[in-house]
Image (spheres, rainbow, N blue to C red):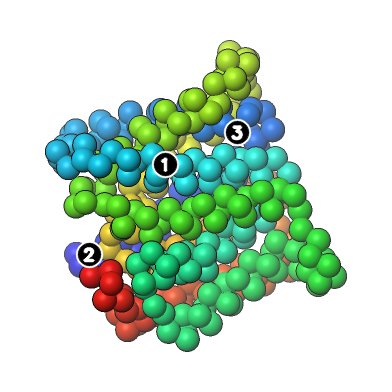
Amino acid sequence: MPPATAGHLAMLLFSALVAGSFALGELAANEIAPAALNAVRFWIAAMVVGFVALSTTGLPRTVAHSLWRYPVLAFFFIVYFVLMFEGLKTAPAVSAAAVFTLTPILSALFGWLLLRQRFTGRIALALAIGGAGALWVIFRANLGALMSFDIGRGEVIYFVGCVSHAIYTPLVATLNRGEPAVAFTFGTLIAGALMLTAWAWGDLMATDWANLPAIVWITILYTAVFASAATFTLLQFAALQLPSSKVMAYTYLTPTWVIVWTIAMGQQAPPLILLVGVAMTVLALLLLLKNEDRDYVRGASSS
């Protein structure tokens, strides 16, 4: 299988798994401190990925080189995850997923700054369509709210997290030294778990773990195994095969997957008018994935 094809399949699965964390996170966000939830999930994810790494590729010696890389990467991802759950305290899952679809625009910007990845006018058009679709959902198809920039607090908080996520994606390609994705992910997760434990120590001690609602444990286990261990590995693998903004283009599928998750969990589907914005994000994805070999040129400074 060509590396680019494998990268696309990895990101297709990534988008479906990420959507589940929005649907579950909306239900659990107000039951536990976001930092405490993420500290536990990072430790579980690190153990899962560590086991997979030892069972497959092993941990090459280069993993231990330049250890500063892992805290740098982990910082941007833990900021993203903590702010995601903080935002989900008030933002509906579909709206939060729409905010997430703004990350391709941000990733294109940081991909240019860090890797000098340049893109065509058609790609810029696709990013604009996707961004417009995201705004349609975020502002709930209310032009008055858009004109007055009446955006919810949860969406604003989560947007800051998405900026952090967008920086993380090109950093993977910049800081990787040839390590397999699963081994590189393990180093990032361990660093993130240590940093989150220090950050959330007070919340961890104050949480009544024995009496947490079941949805919290379901969310912790799902996000640890599927939305952390699996997606970290999928994202890092894809980031080594595809340009940064094409990797994050798959986030445009997230609102669609969230709607599927929402309906599957027996919750009420969003108003039909919001599906216009969702359809625009899917169109943006199709435009971004077309003729990829001619869309991006890496500058000489990054070769």
Query: Which disc, if any, is residue 280?
Result: none
The quadrant holding residue 137 is bottom right
- Residue 11 x, y percent position in the rendering: 38, 59
Viewer-proximal residue, 242 or 4?
242
Q: Is residue 294 above or below residue 147?
A: below
Q: What's the CA distance linking mark 2 and mark 1?
A: 25 Å
Say which of 240 and 216 sits in front: 240
On the image, the x and y values in percent for residue 152 come to: 76, 53
Tell me where residue 248 appears, x and y as whole percent: 45, 62
Amino acid of disc 1:
Ala
Query: What residue sits right under mark 3 in the picture?
Result: 34
Residue drawn at 59 percent across, 20 percent down: 202
The answer to whether residue 247 is visible is yes
Check the picture and name the quadrant holding the N terminus.
bottom left
Picture quarter with the C terminus: bottom left
Q: CA distance from mark 1 to mark 3?
A: 16 Å
Q: Which mark is residue 74?
A: 1
- In the displayed structure image, the side of residue 118 where residue 94 appears, left or right: right
Task: Say which element carries label 3.
Answer: helix
Question: Residue 237 falls in which quadrant of the image?
Answer: bottom left
Q: Which residue is mark 2?
A: 3
Q: Residue furthest bottom?
A: 121
Q: Which residue lies at the image location 38% right of the left edge and 64% below the top edge?
A: 114
**Of callouts 2 and 1, the N-terminal one:** 2
Q: What x and y, as percent, mark residue 32?
A: 63, 27
